Amino acid sequence: MAQILVRNLDDRLKARLQRRAKRNGRSMEAEAREILRDALNEKLPPAVGFGTASVAMFSGGGVFLDEPIQEIRGIRMEIPDFKS
């Protein structure tokens, strides 16, 4: 098992840890382990498919612009050459 040493712990924080450990019937060390375990126990969000994520991202209010989109006129569109 690994060990860590925490230096320069504020006296008030140490006192709070002592009270919490006593309230939970643990040593200060066991209480610190429990706090770290709880804090680092990551809850990963459930994986969703692309479609579900897309609908969630784009559903709702739609697109609102302060100014209308200007039309572009007079630009010649060229078909790309996919053979070369």
Image (tube, rainbow, N blue to C red):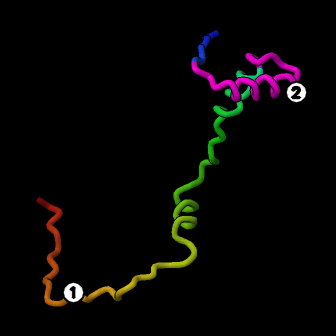
Report the magenta residues as a range: 8-30
Residue type indicated by callout 1: Ile
Q: Earlier in the sequence, mark 1 or mark 2?
A: 2
Q: Is residue 13 left or right of residue 80?
A: right
State the image coordinates of residue 26 (x, y, percent, origin top left): 84, 19
As for residue 75 lying within the magenta part, the answer is no
Question: Which secondary structure lies at badge 1?
Answer: loop
Vertical relation: 42 (above or below) 53: above
The label nearer to you, 1 versus 2, is 2
Please provide percent x and percent y for residue 25.
Answer: 88, 21
What's the distance in space between the residues labelled 1 and 2, CA to CA?
71 Å
Q: Is residue 23 left or right of residue 57?
A: right
Dot 2 amino acid type: Arg
Is residue 11 visible in this depiction of the protein?
yes
Check residue 72 in the rendering and tell me which mark sits there, or answer none.
1
Q: Can residue 37 be seen at all in this image of the molecule?
A: no
Left or right of 61: which side holds 33? right
Residue extending furthest front? 11
Measured along the vertical axis of the image, is residue 21 above or below residue 50? Answer: above
- Picture disc at residue 8: none
Mark 2: secondary structure: helix
Q: Quadrant of residue 28?
A: top right
> In terms of image quadrants, where is residue 73?
bottom left
Query: Which residue: 35% across, 87% down?
Result: 67
Vertical placement of residue 66 versus 3, above or below: below
Count neighbours of disc 1 (C-alpha within 10 A) and say few if under 14, some if 14 to 19, many if 20 or more. few
Q: Is residue 64 above or below residue 40?
A: below
Residue closest to the far left: 84
Q: Main secondary structure of the magenta part?
A: helix
Which disc is residue 23 wearing?
Answer: 2
Where is residue 15? Give x, y as percent: 75, 25
Q: Nearer the viewer, residue 1 or 55?
A: 1
